[in-house]
Amino acid sequence: MDRTRTLLSVCLAAVGFWTADAYADDYITCESRNDRYQSCPISTAGYVTLDRQLSGTACTQGRTWDYNRREIWVDDGCRASFRVHTSSSGHHDNNDAKVAAGVLIGAAILGAIASNANKKDDKYDDNRYQGARHSSYVPGWMVGTFEGYNPLYNADVTLTIDSSGRATGRANGQTINGWINDGYLNVGNNAFNIDQSRDGFVTSQVGDRQNEVRYRRVR
């Protein structure tokens, strides 16, 4: 118990007192009137999916709608209900969840590779990429499973990213969810950027570049 409390304190200090408390998912309706651009604010940052299309005009992610940590935007007649996934799942004990969150954030395995690696060769040649406004775009080479080791907490961490940008990290038997958006790996209230290294990547917490870890891709 003392070891857990000590580790928890270190983790919280390292990540700026981020907590893994669960929030109810938000549902936001956003409408492009007269085919014009419209943005709708998000109260709590989270992974966004289209819940229900309400317009006859197609709502295509990256082309007629997309999102970032602050807002959802629509254009060209798209009107839809969007779900902002802000709840944390997979946690059975809040203290253990915070410890796992601290380890994951400290390790911050992948991040958003799109902002740094192979933009010309990989990003723009992918027919899924919808253009400069497509902030939620995830290139195919970014999808997979990655492993890292956090020497500070003596913890192995695994992160899996799917093609939609949803990120799932596992450490110490706990699961923490995040998402890729706008060139960053987002976990709760924290964001991480990434720099390519000779044998993999180095991730660093925005606002605290000392909090960085090297990792490698496994599949």
Image (cartoon, helix red, strand yellow):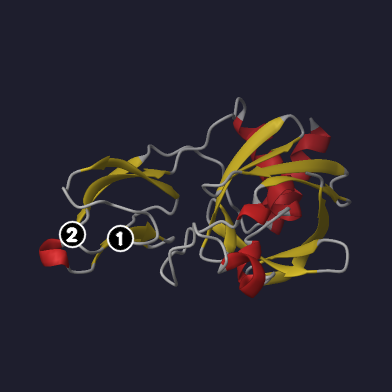
Q: Is residue 171 toward the left or the right of residue 163 in the image?
A: right
Instruction: Check disc 1 and report the residue beneath it.
Output: 64
In the depicted view, which residue is nearer to us: 23 or 7?
A: 23
Quadrant of the rendered image containing residue 62: bottom left
Q: Earlier in the sequence, mark 1 or mark 2?
A: 1
Q: Which amino acid does label 1 sit on?
A: Thr
**Residue 137, labelled with which disc?**
none
In the depicted view, which residue is nearer to us: 4 or 134?
A: 134
Q: Quarter of the image containing the C terminus?
A: top right
In the depicted view, which residue is nearer to us: 90 or 68?
A: 68
Return the residue found at the far left: 34
Q: Is mark 2 on a helix, strand or loop?
A: loop
**Vertical side of 217 occupied by 91: above or below:** above
- Do the CB atoms of the residues marked 1 and 2 lie less than 8 Å apart? yes
**Residue visible at 67% across and 51% down?**
12
Rendering coords of residue 173 (x, y %): 74, 29
Q: Is residue 76 toward the left or the right of residue 118 in the image?
A: left
Q: How far apart are marks 1 and 2 (CA)?
A: 8 Å
Rendering coords of residue 35 (x, y %): 16, 65
In the depicted view, which residue is nearer to us: 94 or 68?
A: 68
Instruction: Check disc 2 and report the residue beneath it.
Output: 77
Q: Is mark 1 on a helix, strand or loop?
A: loop
Quadrant of the rendered image containing residue 119: bottom right
Rendering coords of residue 83 (x, y %): 34, 43
Q: Is residue 81 toward the left or the right of residue 144 in the image?
A: left
Q: Few, some or many C-alpha atoms within 10 Å of disc 2 (few <14, some 14-19, many ≥20)?
A: many
**Residue visible at 78% across and 64% down?**
202
Q: What residue type is labelled 2?
A: Gly
